[in-house]
Amino acid sequence: MLLPIIMKFIRFLTAECTAFFQHIGRRILKHRYYKTNA
């Protein structure tokens, strides 16, 4: 009864975290890229 809600919540959280870390990772990669090519 409560498990599907928890599973949905966890899935939502993991998706949000993944998107957040991908965004951070891209920024770090871009920063390094610009630094090395400067």
Image (cartoon, helix red, strand yellow):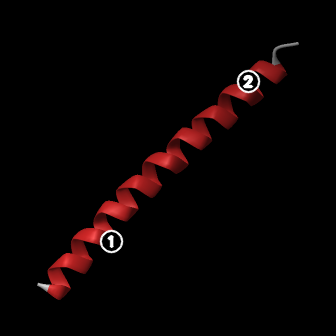
Residue 21: percent from left, percent from top = 44, 53
Residue found farthest to the bottom: 37
Mark 2 surroundings: few (<14), some (14-19) or many (≥20) residues within 10 A: few
- Relative to 29, is 15 above or below? above
Amino acid marked by disc 2: Ile
Q: Position of residue 2 (x, y in %)?
A: 81, 14
Comparing 7 with 36, the one in front is 36
**Residue 28: quarter of image:** bottom left
| 4 relative to 33, above or below | above
Residue at 73% x, 24% y is 6
Question: What SS does tag 1 mark?
Answer: helix
Count the marks.
2
How far is the residue under mark 1 from the one under mark 2? 34 Å
Q: Is residue 20 left or right of residue 29?
A: right
| Front in this rendered view, residue 13 or 2 | 13
As drawn, is 27 to the left or to the right of 20?
left
Pick whichever of labels 1 and 2 is earlier in the sequence. Answer: 2
- In percent of width and height, residue 13 lies at 58, 35
Check disc 2 and report the residue beneath it. Answer: 6
Residue furthest to the top = 1
Q: From the top left corner, tell me how far across and down residue 19 is, in percent.
A: 50, 48
Mark carried by residue 21: none
Q: Amino acid at mark 1?
A: Leu
* Left or right of 23 on screen, residue 33: left
Residue at image coords 36%, 56%: 24
Q: Label 1: which residue?
A: 29
Secondary structure, mark 2, is: helix
Figure quadrant of residue 3: top right
- The correct choice, above or below, for 33 with respect to 2 in the image is below
Q: Residue at x 18, y 86 (%)?
A: 36
Residue 29 placement, left or right of 5:
left
